[in-house]
Image: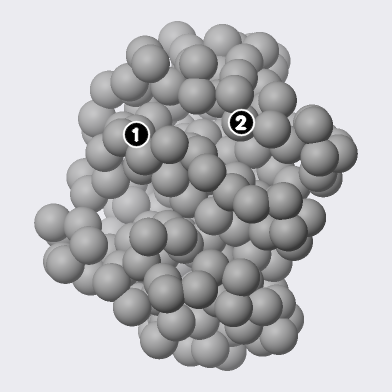
């Protein structure tokens, strides 16, 4: 499995979002990361399915992975499927039945993943591990871009890598929060293979050069 750098549009230039995402896509990112926050589960508000659809209409063809940080994730699945999303991750504590939510995501033609905050243990039963396409670990507390990487995340990444390997899972191990040139190499060595990069990429004046730098450190 190749390693993927995903650009977080939470750190994009929202005044010209389509152009900014088009440029970072052309520079070679493997995915566009969509943070969806509803001001309830996370103390901030961000993008909805209509923005995802607008990016597709604008001509963005890069895969879009959606991270639902909302109180009722089931309500967002079908709209994002119709908007052109490729993958949805959600927090298991926000649903009554994680297995059912994963099935609903897949029934809508998307890949499915589980996400865990820094203060949450990674607890997944065997049946669900066999069904997920991504395990997403937050290395900052979600809500705002530009936060510093939580150092304790390295041990959690190693644990999650061991868990996926134990079950021969092909799921990506994704890490999101504070990833930049200073730490992406260590995050990779710890076992991650999907890297959500926000300000560490989107603040650059040259996306191609920055992606080359990040990739070299993997």
Q: Reply above or below: 12 against 208.
A: below
Local secondary structure at mark 1: loop
Q: Is residue 49 left or right of residue 150?
A: right
| Colouring scheme, one of rainbow, by chain, secondary structure, one colour | one colour
Q: Reply above or below: 111 against 175.
A: below
* Observer-nearest of 139 and 130: 130
Residue under the point 40% across and 86% down: 75
Residue under the point 55% across and 76% down: 101
Image disc number at residue 209: none
Q: Position of residue 80 (x, y in %)?
A: 51, 81
Q: Position of residue 119 (x, y in %)?
A: 31, 35
* Observer-nearest of 111 and 72: 72
Q: For marks 1 and 2, give the CA distance.
A: 13 Å
> In the rendered image, which residue does mark 2 sit on?
160
Which quadrant is home to the C terminus?
top right
Q: Position of residue 8 (x, y in %)?
A: 44, 48
* Observer-nearest of 46 and 21: 46
Image disc number at residue 118: 1
Q: Residues within 10 Å of mark 1 (few under 14, many from 20)?
A: some
Q: Is residue 130 left or right of residue 56?
A: right
Residue under the point 80% across and 32% down: 166
Which quadrant is home to the N terminus?
top right
Q: Residues within 10 Å of mark 2 (few under 14, many from 20)?
A: many
Q: Reply above or below: 97 against 107.
A: above
Question: Which of the 4 image quarters holds residue 88?
Answer: bottom right
Residue 90 visible (yes or no):
yes
Question: Which of the 4 image quarters holds residue 41?
Answer: bottom left
Q: Reply above or below: 116 against 111.
A: above
Instruction: First in sequence, mark 1 or 2: give its number.
Output: 1
């Amino acid at each position: 499995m190749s390693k993927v750098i995903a650009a977080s549009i939470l750190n994009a230039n929202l005044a010209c979002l389509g152009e900014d995402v088009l440029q970072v896509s052309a520079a070679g990112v493997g995915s566009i990361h969509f943070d969806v926050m509803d001001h309830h589960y996370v103390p901030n508000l961000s993008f909805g399915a209509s923005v995802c659809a607008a990016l597709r209409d604008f001509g963005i063809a890069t895969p879009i992975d959606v991270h639902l940080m909302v109180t009722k994730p089931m309500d967002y699945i079908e709209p994002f499927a119709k908007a052109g999303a490729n993958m949805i991750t959600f927090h298991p504590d926000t649903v009554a039945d994680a297995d059912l939510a994963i099935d609903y995501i897949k029934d809508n033609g998307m890949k499915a993943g589980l996400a865990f905050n820094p203060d949450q243990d990674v607890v997944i039963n065997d049946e669900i591990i066999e069904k997920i396409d991504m395990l997403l670990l937050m290395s900052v507390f979600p809500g705002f871009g530009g936060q510093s990487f939580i150092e304790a995340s390295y041990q959690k990444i190693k644990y999650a890598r061991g868990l996926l390997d134990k079950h021969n899972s092909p799921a990506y191990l994704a890490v999101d929060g504070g990833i930049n040139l200073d730490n992406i190499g260590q995050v990779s060595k710890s076992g991650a293979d999907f890297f959500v990069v926000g300000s560490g990429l989107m603040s650059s004046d040259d996306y191609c050069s920055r992606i080359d730098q990040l990739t070299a450190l993997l």
